[in-house]
Image (tube, grey):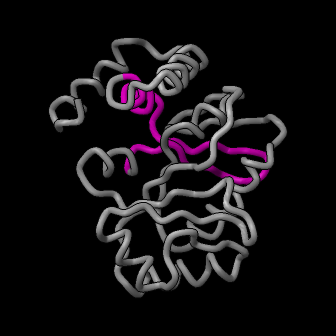
Amino acid sequence: MNFKENGIIELERELSELDQFVLDFVKVLEKHASYVIVSGYVAILFGRTRTTEDVDMFIEILDLEKAKLLYEDLLRSGFWALNVNSEVDFFSALSENIAVRFARNGVVIPNMEVKFVKDYLDKITLENKVKVFTRGGIICISELALQIAYKRFVLKSEKDIEDAQHLQEWFNISDENVNKYRHILKEHGRI
């Protein structure tokens, strides 16, 4: 793995089936919307050994027409929506802050959990994303110190604490950097 300037990481390992699923999904998505992947998959991408059923992401807010185009393109590309049945349902769910899950046709797991950004914290997560260059393409993830702070101070499950610890050790991120985001999370009512 190589760290580059300006929020870029080069990841040179072999891709897993989960990585390929994510790459296939985001290659369709990025034609329609800006996105950022958050939560457990970020730790898995960087070597944490654990399973996950879903990959969480935020996308920019789209109008109905753009949402319809995205939905149709995902269906044409071999994905199906687990919890909505139409383009309008897709847009309505996202607009009501309900995550929409997509998987490859014929399966349920793994799935992508897609949400519109809803507040300041989601927006800064989207705006400050890190690009990870893999052998199969680019995956945009949450800024790592923010990811660690969110898992450690907001989610706080054993799995989330272990994810945070893995990322902090793997990237040698200081407590000072993590605590900067802890204060932001507190200011915005997440803690």
Q: Quadrant of residue 61?
A: bottom left
Query: In this orientation, which residue lies closer to the viewer: 98 or 57?
Result: 98
Q: Which quadrant: the C terminus?
A: top left
Q: Residue at x 58, y 19 (%)?
A: 166
Count up the numbered dots.
0
Magenta-drawn segment: 127-152
Q: Residue at x 77, y 52 (%)?
A: 136
Q: Position of residue 180 (x, y in %)?
A: 28, 22
Q: Residue at x 51, y 70 (%)?
A: 83
Q: Is residue 137 magenta?
A: yes
Vertical arrangement, residue 74 with respect to residue 17, above or below: below
Q: Position of residue 127 (x, y in %)?
A: 37, 50
> Seen in the image, is 2 located left or right of residue 37?
right
Vertical arrangement, residue 2 with respect to residue 137, above or below: above
Q: Residue at x 28, y 24 (%)?
A: 182
Q: Position of residue 92 (x, y in %)?
A: 35, 77
Q: Quadrant of residue 12?
A: top right
